[in-house]
Image (cartoon, helix red, strand yellow):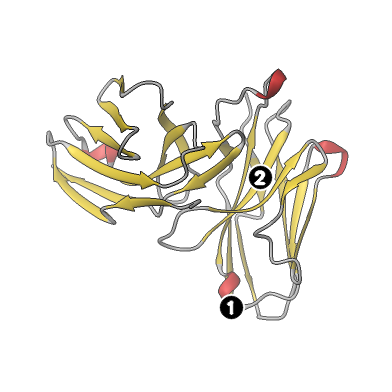
Amino acid sequence: EAGVAQSPRYKIIEKRQSVAFWCNPISGHATLYWYQQILGQGPKLLIQFQNNGVVDDSQLPKDRFSAERLKGVDSTLKIQPAKLEDSAVYLCASSLNLAGGANTGELFFGEGSRLTVL
Amino acid sequence: QQQVKQSPQSLIVQKGGISIINCAYENTAFDYFPWYQQFPGKGPALLIAIRPDVSEKKEGRFTISFNKSAKQFSLHIMDSQPGDSATYFCAASTGDKLIFGTGTRLQVFP
């Protein structure tokens, strides 16, 4: 079974430029997450989708970050304009939500997209 | 209240030794406590998980101990191996939302 695919793996941009990251979750996984992992820290949830609807975006800096999940499959995360503090690894994860809301809590992560803002 | 506190930040263990990583939480609504393992350049991967209705879960060399009254849980790695060298994250979940600890970098030396 194919895992979560992310691209690009690495991106270097100047501050105030824009960048977009793409994620393709595991087939059949209804829930998709974007996490931000700053060096030396644990992953921090940015946004969570259930199919193509947003479940939680409370920690997404909406003045500069946006995300969409069209057709409930692939997702893109965009940053515009980027700041120095956005340098991090952006992890996409997906999970299988079982009927009735029961959930193992197991998230399957991609390898991440490492962003460096100069 | 949504935080998960993890310690130590780093841990050095000799091959064959026991590695112990501790986590604490405040939110009693958390109902699922997984541990994730992350190798450099890779995403985190689920290692082992426990629910609060049991006090211990063992899978091979990995054991989670859970203390519901103290709101603490820990990961024990028995017979630690150099291949276990990675960063370990505890996490806590209510339903679908997963909150991660700050991570412990484990180094196992031969």
- Tell me what residue is drawn at x 70 percent, y 35 percent: A31
Quarter of the figure with the N terminus of chain A: top right
Side of B68 where A45 appears, left or right: right
Does dot 1 land on a helix, a strand or a loop?
helix
Q: Chain of mark 2?
A: A
Are marks 1 and 2 in one subunit? yes
Which amino acid, by three-letter code, is at mark 2? Tyr
Q: Residue furthest right?
A: A71
Which mark is nearer the camera, 1 or 2?
2
Q: Position of residue A71 (x, y in %)?
A: 87, 38
Which residue does the image show at 66% across and 55% down from the upper left? A8
User: Where on the picture, by quarter, is residue B97?
Assistant: top right
- Rate crowding at label 1 as few (under 14), some (14 to 19) or many (20 or more) other CA atoms within 10 Å: some
Q: Count numbered badges in the picture.
A: 2
Q: Residue at x 35, y 40 (%)?
A: B71
Instruction: From the top left corner, tell me how far across and down residue A36 is, in percent.
Output: 57, 57
Res A60 → quadrant: bottom right
Which of B56/A3 is in front?
A: B56
- Residue A50 lies in what quarter of the image? top right
| Nearer the observer, A86 or A23 | A86
Q: Is residue A27 above or below residue A93?
A: above
Residue at mark 1 to residue at mark 2: CA–CA distance? 23 Å
A38 left or right of A52 in image: left
| For the residues bearing labels 1 and 2, Cβ distance under 8 angstroms | no
Q: Which SS class for mark 2? A: strand
The residue nearer to you, when weighing A110 against B105, is B105
**Height in image: B86 above or below A66?**
above
Q: Residues within 10 Å of mark 2 (few under 14, many from 20)?
A: many
Please indicate whether residue B32 sits to the left or right of residue B78 in the image.
right
Residue at mark 2:
A33
Question: Residue at label 1?
Answer: A84
**Three-letter amino acid code at disc 1?**
Leu
